[in-house]
Amino acid sequence: MPTKKIRVSPELYSFLSKEAKIRNLTIGNYVQRLVDNLRHIQYHSQLINNNGNDLRDFFLENKIEFAEYLMRIRDIGLRKEHEYLSILSSKLIDIYGLEDLQDNLLEQYSDNYGRALKNLFNFMEFKGLDNFNNIPIERWKINVKLKPSNSDSDSNSFLSATKVDEI
């Protein structure tokens, strides 16, 4: 691959020189490693955001890390963590888009399921995902309506009643 010369600030050059020296590399080799690492990260993020992934597969592939997130980051108790993992394992089906999510919520809705889904979407954001199947995580989150804490209304009334338009 041909080398490409780029102009960098003196501060960046100084930083790269120090980092390269620490690793016993030339600046060019050090920069090439950085570029390779960025390509690797980009490749894996494309795999994660690739159309065709479903929410259940994402959950199953990240179940242990999600459980740790619930305990350490969200500070959720062991009982509630087990409840969320169990309900997602049993009710989460192949969901590829927002219409699938709404259909699933209409069939399977409970407040704990909604909260577990919200936590799963928050976990995705925590992992640095902006999109899932090319749909912003924020759009996934707003389609899960939670029952207000002190309400006795029918749980299905908390689902989004608007038609979902896919991106």
Image: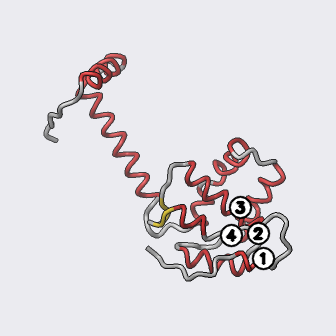
Question: In which quadrant is the N terminus drawn?
Answer: top left
* Cα–Cα gap, marks 4 and 1: 9 Å
Q: Amino acid at mark 2?
A: Lys
Q: Which residue in the structure is indicated by mark 4?
A: 145
Marks 3/1: CA–CA distance: 15 Å
Q: Earlier in the sequence, mark 2 or mark 3?
A: 3
Tell me the residue at 75%/44% (across/down): 75
- Name the spot of residue 141 as percent of width and height, x first: 60, 64
Q: What label sits on residue 111 in the rendered view?
A: none
Decide: is 18 above or below 34: above
Q: Are marks 2 and 1 in contact (CB under 8 Å)?
A: yes
User: Looking at the rendered structure, which numbered label has been put on residue 147?
Assistant: 2
**How far apart in space, not on screen, are marks 2 and 4 (Cα)?**
7 Å
Establish if 161 lies above or below 133.
below
Of the image marks 4 and 3, the number of the one nearer the N terminus: 3
Which SS class for mark 2? Answer: loop
Please tell me which of labels 3 and 1 falls first in the chain.
3
Q: List the residue tagged with mark 1.
A: 155
The number of numbered discs placed on residues in the rendered structure image is: 4
Tag 4, which secondary structure? loop
**Element type where label 1 sits in the image:** helix
Residue 89, horizontal then vertical, whole percent? 71, 65
Residue labelled with disc 3: 116
- Element assignment for label 3: helix
- The amino acid on which the numbered mark 3 sits, given as a three-letter code, is Ala
Residue at 54% in and 62% down: 138
- Do residues under tags 2 and 4 come within 8 Å of each other at their CB atoms? yes
Tell me whether the residue at label 3 lies in contact with that at label 1, contact meaning CB atoms closer than 8 angstroms.
no
Of circles 2 and 3, the one toward us is 2
Q: In whole angstroms, how far apart are the C-alphas of marks 4 and 3?
A: 12 Å
